[in-house]
Amino acid sequence: MLSDQKIGFIGSGNMGEALISGLVLSKVSLPENIICSDVRQDQLDAIQAKYGIATTTENLEVIERSDIVVYATKPQILHTVFKETAKALDMSKLIISIAAGVPLAAIESCLQKKLRLIRVMPNICAFVRESATAIAAGKNVLKGDVELAKAVFDSVGKSVFIQENVLMDAFTGLSGSGPAYIFMIIDAMADAGVKMGLSRKDSLFLSTQTVLGAAKLLLESKEHPGQLKDRVTSPGGTAIAGIHTLEQGGLRTTMINAVEAASKRSTELGELMIKNFAKNNEEE
C-alpha cells in the first residue's frame, strides 16, 4: 500500500526516528521514498547514515517531496511549525500529526483550510515495534486515508481507528500512559523477588519475561484474561494466595482510577491546547 507513497517526517526526534526505523526495517517503505527534516544537522547525518533516507533542514522541502507528511514535532512548537508550512499544504497530501494532546480542532483552527488531517497517538513501545496506536480522522479525509495511516503505524506495532472526540482521551489514559503503569508493576515485582532472596538482575529479568509471556499468551490464545487467570490458580495454591492479597490491596480499583485520572488529564490538556492555539492565532 505504501510502496508508491513518498513519506516525509517533519521532526526526527525519538518518535520520528522510531517510525522511520519501523518503515525501513519492515520493508513497508523503501528508504528512497522517505525524507525527514530537523534543525539538528548532526541528528540528520546520523539518521541518513543509519537508514539511507533523504534528509533536509527545510520543512517545506519535506512537504514538497511527500505524499504523506507526518508532523513529529513537540506539541509546544507545533503551532509555529504549522504556520510556517501551511502555505505548502493542500488536499493532495495526507497530513498526520503525532503531537500528544493536540486535538484535530486545534490543528484545524490553526491551518484554516480544507486538508486531509489525521491525528495519531502511538506509545513509547514504537521503539521496539510493539506500539499500541490510536488513529482518528478529520472531516476531510478521503477513502483509503485511514488505511494509509494504519500501514505507516502498523510498521511499529498495532493500530486501531477510533472516534477522536469520544475516545482519544480514553486511549491516552489506557495505552498512551499504560507502559508507565506496567513499568511500575515490573519494578514492584522485581523488588518482591529481591525481598524473597533473588538477585536484582535475576528478579528484574524474571519479572519482565513474566509480563511479556503473559501478554503474548493473552494475545495469541484470544482467551479472556479471567479464564487464563483461572488456569494458573489451582485450589489452595500459591497463585490464589497472591491474588487474594492483590484484591485486598485494591489493585483493580487503583488501576481503573489511574486510567480514569490520566484520561481526564488528557482532556484538560487538549482543552488547554485549543485555547493556546486560538490565542496564537489572535496574536498573529
Image (spheres, grey):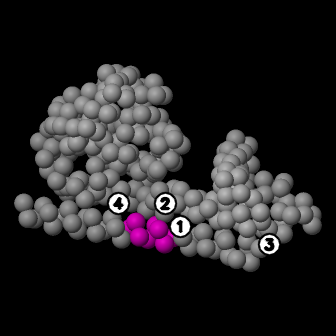
Q: Is residue 190 visible?
A: yes
Q: Is residue 18 above or below residue 202?
A: above
> Of helix, strand and loop, which mostly describes the magenta segment?
helix
Magenta stretch bounds: 259-267
Q: Is residue 92 visible?
A: no
First along the sequence among labels 4 and 1: 4
Q: Considering depth in this image, is 45 or 25 the residue closer to the camera?
A: 45
Q: Is residue 146 left or right of residue 113?
A: right
Q: Position of residue 92 (x, y in %)?
A: 22, 33
Residues marked 1 and 2 touching at CB (< 8 Å): yes
First along the sequence among labels 2 and 3: 2
Disc 1 on helix, strand or loop? helix
- Of badges 1 and 2, nearer the viewer stands 2
Residue 18 lies in magenta, yes or no? no
Pointer 4 residue: 101
The residue located at (14%, 50%) in the rendering is: 83
Disc 3 on helix, strand or loop? helix
Q: Residue furthest left?
A: 284
Q: Is residue 98 above or below residue 284?
A: above
First along the sequence among labels 4 and 2: 4
- Identify which amino acid the numbered label 1 is placed on: Val
Pointer 2 residue: 177
Pointer 3 residue: 244
First along the sequence among labels 3 and 1: 3
